[in-house]
Image (tube, grey):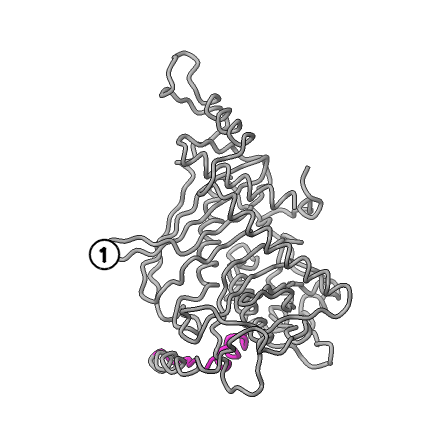
Amino acid sequence: MLSARFLLPRLPLTGRSLCSGVAAKHGKTPTTADGSPPLHVSNVRNKLREIVGASTNWSDHQQAMADRASLSSMLARSQSDLPAKKMKDSRLEVHLPLGSEPQLREKYLTFHNTVRFGRILEDLDSLAVLISYSHTYNPALQRSPLSIVTALVDKIDMRQHIIYPDCDIKFTGHVSWVGKTSIEAKMHMSQFQDGAYAPILDATFVMVARDPQNKRAAFVNPLVAEGPEEEKLLQEGEANKLRRVELSTASLLKVAPTDEERKIVHSLFLNTLDSNTVSFRSRLLPPNSVWMEDAKLKGLEICHPQERNIFNRIFGGFLMRKAYELGWANACSYAGRRPTLVAVDDILFQKPVEIGSLLLLSSQVCYTQDQYIQVRVHSEVFDPLTRQHSTTNIFHYTFASEAEVPHIVPKTYGESMLYLDGKRHFNQTVHP
């Protein structure tokens, strides 16, 4: 039985209607709690550059990053040296006026007159970094000595599957938990429809603070709760941390599958044996099924300076956008129709991607159930001089089709582990 939040009505994927009503179509500029207008989405990256002293010019930017090494002396020697912050200190509201500023739409528009979700991922990533810097803000310093980067996208839950391209969007968020050197940021996205803002998605990002040269961990301000609701958020953040540790410990890259999972793998194997021969090597594809090796899609990106972040490396949001679009294309090819996104789960940033890298992306349908498709995207950088491959990111996406999709069937033991890993991520998504 699927969780109620995923059993949402799905409109036809072609000929979608736009926002209804004149007021809703043009949107409405929101205001913050104190009555001032929120930050425009185009200014988020500019604010981040101001905070760390980065430049928009490539040559100047390189020198500015080199100059950051002198900020190391401003780092706290322990977390106790830093003042405690409240959740309201990092609370931000960002406006994406697709309705009231039509000139913005082209960047976000798909051919099918919907919003490019990859662009939304970019905006969420930038906002999570700015929220983290708001939490660690020190008015006595002209530039922040911290290098705050995305470590993990814990989850993104879609509360509505359609994002209209001509209605204003509002992002809100704040820090919800901190460790000694890590920060959890919760964000919400809503869209102006029928005279009010309706929820679209909820996202949880985990950020890490590093020294000015991004070489070692740095302490961040502790967080104190005000009231029972914020105390609950802190407890949820601690529970999320423990859950991530447990999942990492139980990874199929480290330990054997459970007894139940081993039975699943063996059952899949038996279902593919040729009953006419007594051989383990003779394999037949069951009806309405696809071999896992035939459900791949790959891509290559040359990482240019245009896609850099404020620390002279490739912007994490760009990586998420490219991985999502490849994963979506694979799900679309597999289902034979355009899928909708249900959830993003456990995007892990293992290694930064340097400018000039050759980025190899590989997407794999690794699990299916009814109309749902679980896609894993693996990204790695390839050094043509040393011929070395290094994993940088792992992405997990859950998509849904309008009709039941073929069963994905693993053939090798490695593919069986991918199948079980996909099943675990799918179960976390639909049975939270």
Q: Quadrant of the N terminus?
A: top right
Where is 418 relative to 149, above or below? above
**In which image quadrant can residue 402 be found?**
top right
How many circles with numbers are drawn on the protein?
A: 1
Q: Viewer-proximal residue, 327 or 136?
A: 136
- How many residues crowd around disc 1 within 10 Å: few (fewer than 14), some, or many (20 or more)? few
Q: In x, y percent, where is residue 18?
A: 64, 59
Q: Nearer the viewer, residue 294 or 274?
A: 274
Asked if residue 14 shows in the view, the reply is no
Q: Is residue 41 magenta?
A: no
Q: Residue at x 36, y 70 (%)?
A: 305
Majority secondary structure in the magenta region: helix
- What residue is rendered at 64% in x and 69% in y? 174
Q: Check if residue 48 falls in the magenta segment.
A: yes
> Residue visible at 73% across and 76% down?
33
Quadrant of the rendered image containing residue 311: bottom left
Q: Which residues are magenta?
A: 42-58
Residue denoted by label 1: 386
Q: Is 356 positioned to the left or the right of 209 in the image? A: left
Horizontal and vertical percent for residue 36? Answer: 69, 81
- Taking the view exactly as shown, the residue that stands out farthest to the left is 385
The amino acid pointed to by label 1 is Thr
Residue 168: % across, % down: 64, 68
